[in-house]
Image (tube, grey):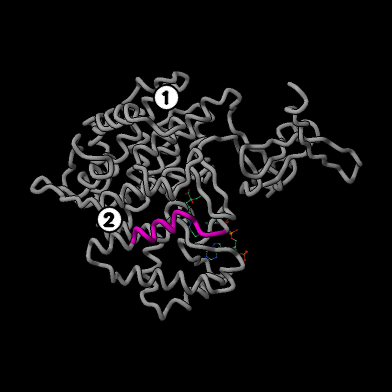
Amino acid sequence: MSDQHHQPQKTFTITNDETGESWVLPVVEGTVGPPAVDVRKFYAETGHFTFDPSFTSTGSCKSRITFIDGDEGILMYRGYDIKELAEKSTFLEVSYLLLYGDLPNKAEMDDFHHTITYHTMVHEQIINFFRGFRRDAHPMAVMCGVVGALSAFYHDSLDIWDPRQREISAHRLLSKMPTLAAMSYKYGIGQPFIYPRNDLGYAENFLHMCFSVPAEDYKCSPTIARAMDRIFILHADHEQNASTSTVRLAGSSQANPFACIAAGIASLWGPSHGGANQAVLEMLSEIGSKDRIPEFLERAKDKDDSFRLMGFGHRVYKNYDPRAEVLRESCHEVLEELGVSDDPMLELAMELERIALEDPYFVERKLYPNVDFYSGIILKAIGFPPNMFTVLFALARTIGWISQWKEMIEEPAHRIGRPRQVYTGPTARPYVDMGKR
Ligand code: SDX
């Protein structure tokens, strides 16, 4: 390669102050975002581990799928800004983009749409899995079970080394998550399951399976269907968050894709992660009225109080979560359409946001509303109970999870993930017989 193109390898030198030894570590650079120090040989060369318990400073992989600039409040899927995609694209088109890397042309989109539409039914025996749950089971518990069980039905797409089987599994998961999510909802409310229809769009079909009954079809307004589709777009992927990292780590052991997605669902369920949208509604209900906001803000600041302002803060965003901005606008559209524009829950949320963003505690810590702050208000207005909110998050995030899983499997150098530790327990000691303890 001629000199003008040959960029010298950037490096980091680290010195052990105790021994004076130094090591030169290569720097890894992406197309955008912070560079990274490559520490893959750090332990072999220095006899030291690096230490970063919640990975605040650790890149776990190279990825071409999603990029976040937390300081600027930027989110891009394959280089396309989330606000532009939310405004101009559809969830199925965004799913194609995440999975294959580029926006589809018309023929590609028509083919993809047909494939996904014609895989929305699930094996009839899966109904038996639902019957094993209590009716009051949390739908996320049901989803953990039935999604993992898909690997018991689709033996023809479990060979993770076969590109076509990887693609078929991705299509099956994208197609069937709405059907299983709707079934988890119907089972909880004691209504019969509603089969998918091939003449409806992705979001509309999901709403049909949730809200139609054998006696009467659900009449889905275009505004509601569009809002649902947009919510799916906004939740589709988000770099190496906790649930995506769970999917990647599960996949690194060569577990089948259905088991990996079930692991992601389990991780997403936590109230610090995808469970926050349900927790926001429960928090707003607990606050109840604007005059109690100061009391709860004080609790959120109290280190001795486990209460946190749900829907606020983010590991990466230290600016407004761009998804929250889009959802706040969608809130008004949906509530207007449903004639509940004076929803006290929305008014309370907006007042809480206004007060919190003036409070030094939140300003100093750059705690802004995140994706979960407004989503629950829209979902409740559409007709979903709070215990379904995280299921909808999992439905949407499945395409992100499976795209990240596929990228990892297709990475030639990928190996099983195996973090180390700093051991702080007892050093070696002999067994003591019961009589001498
Ligand atoms: C999602 O990672 C992703 O990308 C996730 C996600 C995705 O799309 O996959 O974006 C989806 O999970 C969004 C986040 C949803 N969770 C919530 O809304 C729950 C409430 N938020 C917090 O639990 C918290 O903000 C986290 C979990 C989101 C982030 O936690 P961090 O990175 O560990 O933040 P931190 O604890 O380092 O916060 C720094 C300070 C601390 O105070 P000090 O020790 O500096 O005094 O801010 C405080 C925290 O106590 N703080 C909060 C707070 N969030 C942080 N204080 C009150 N209320 C909060 N919500």
Q: Identify the residue at image location x=24%, y=45%.
A: 204
Coordinates of residue 432 in the picture (x, y in percent): 69, 43
Q: Residue at x 73, y 27 (%)?
A: 5
Q: Please tell me which residue lies in front, 212 or 298.
A: 212
Q: Quadrant of the N terminus?
A: top right
Q: Nearer the viewer, residue 35 or 146?
A: 35
Q: Secondary structure at mark 1?
A: helix
Residue 159 pos. (x, y %): 43, 20
Q: Nearer the viewer, residue 410 or 350?
A: 350
Residue 378 on the magenta span? no
Residue most extreme to the bottom: 291
CB at disc 1 and ligand 1 closer than 8 Å: no
Q: Residues within 10 Å of mark 1 (few under 14, many from 20)?
A: many
Query: Badge 2 is on which residue?
Result: 384
Residue beneath the point at 25% across and 53% down: 223
Mark 2 or mark 1: whose residue is earlier in sequence = 1
The amino acid type, in three-letter code, at marker 1 is Arg
With respect to residue 332, does 144 lie above or below? above
Bounds of the magenta span? 319-331
Q: Position of residue 225 (x, y in %)?
A: 26, 49
**Where does ligand 1 appear, by image quarter?**
bottom right
Q: Is residue 65 left or right of residue 425?
A: left
Callout 2–callout 1 Cβ contact below 8 Å: no
Left or right position of 115 against 296? left
Task: Residue under label 1, please give it.
Answer: 166
On the image, which quarter does residue 387 sit in?
bottom left
Q: Is residue 141 left or right of residue 182?
A: right
Q: Is residue 340 above or below residue 133?
A: below
